[in-house]
Image (tube, rainbow, N blue to C red):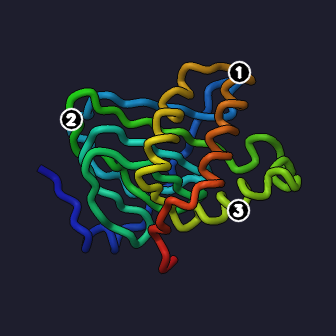
Amino acid sequence: TFVITMANMKNTKPAFEKINLEFGNSLLIKQHTEVVENNLPFWHFHPELELVYVNKAKGKRHIGSHLSYFNNSQLILIGASLPHSGFTDRFTSNGAETIIQFKEEFLGETFFDIPEMQSVKTLFARAKKGLLFHQEAKKEIGPKSEGLLNYKGIDRIIYFLEILKDLSLSKDYTLLNVDG
């Protein structure tokens, strides 16, 4: 069995992960409902932001210099190029992990510069430290992120903007990588 300890992780540079979007899509959405055997922690970063909702599972958070454990569920927004590793150690029955990866400029270089989108632009800036959303936000927004799989095309983008709006208005979060 191969074990990665924190001492080994500190001496390891995060690997660059290239995210490949499907043709005609601006968002990459993945959902895992089963644990992949031999799924070792992969310390990596990518220029895309990543929204992760883990529903009914146990695991470890390793985001930047932050390391902690969770039980049952979590909702995290990871900023662009913030090193992190996988989260799920073990699913309970009916568990799932939903991952949404997207570039900050997925709607164009200046879309989030308009006055109506300032709260989302601020959200993206806060996400550079990693955001862990708490109970109220998790209960409301987590299932919406799972539901994003049911939408296609422009409806998916509109529904995702609603999720970003909800995240940006939430005060129910903790910054994870406060030391930078």
Residue placed at 52% from the left, 26% from the top?
147
* Mark 1 or 2, closer to the camera: 2
**Which residue in the structure is indicated by mark 2?**
92
Left or right: residue 16 versus residue 158 is left
**Which residue in the structure is indicated by mark 1?**
153
Question: Who comes first in sequence, dot 1 or dot 3?
Answer: 3
Disc 2 is placed on an element classified as strand
* Most foreground residue, 16 or 123: 123
Residue type marked 1? Gly
Image x and y of residue 98, in percent? 44, 36
Cα–Cα span, label 1 and label 3: 26 Å
Q: Is residue 124 above or below residue 52?
A: below
**Which residue in the structure is indicated by mark 3?**
122
Left or right: residue 120 versus residue 113 is left
Image x and y of residue 165, in percent? 68, 46
Residue count near mark 3 (Cα–Cα under 10 Å), binned few <14, some 14–19, many ≥20 = few
Residue type marked 2? Thr
Q: Is residue 4 above or below residue 20?
A: below
Image x and y of residue 163, in percent? 62, 40
Residue placed at 21% from the left, 66% from the top?
5
Residue placed at 56% from the left, 28% from the top?
148
Disc 1 is placed on an element classified as helix
Cα–Cα span, label 1 and label 2: 32 Å
Residue type marked 3? Thr
Cα–Cα span, label 3 and label 2: 35 Å
* Mark 1 or 3, closer to the camera: 3
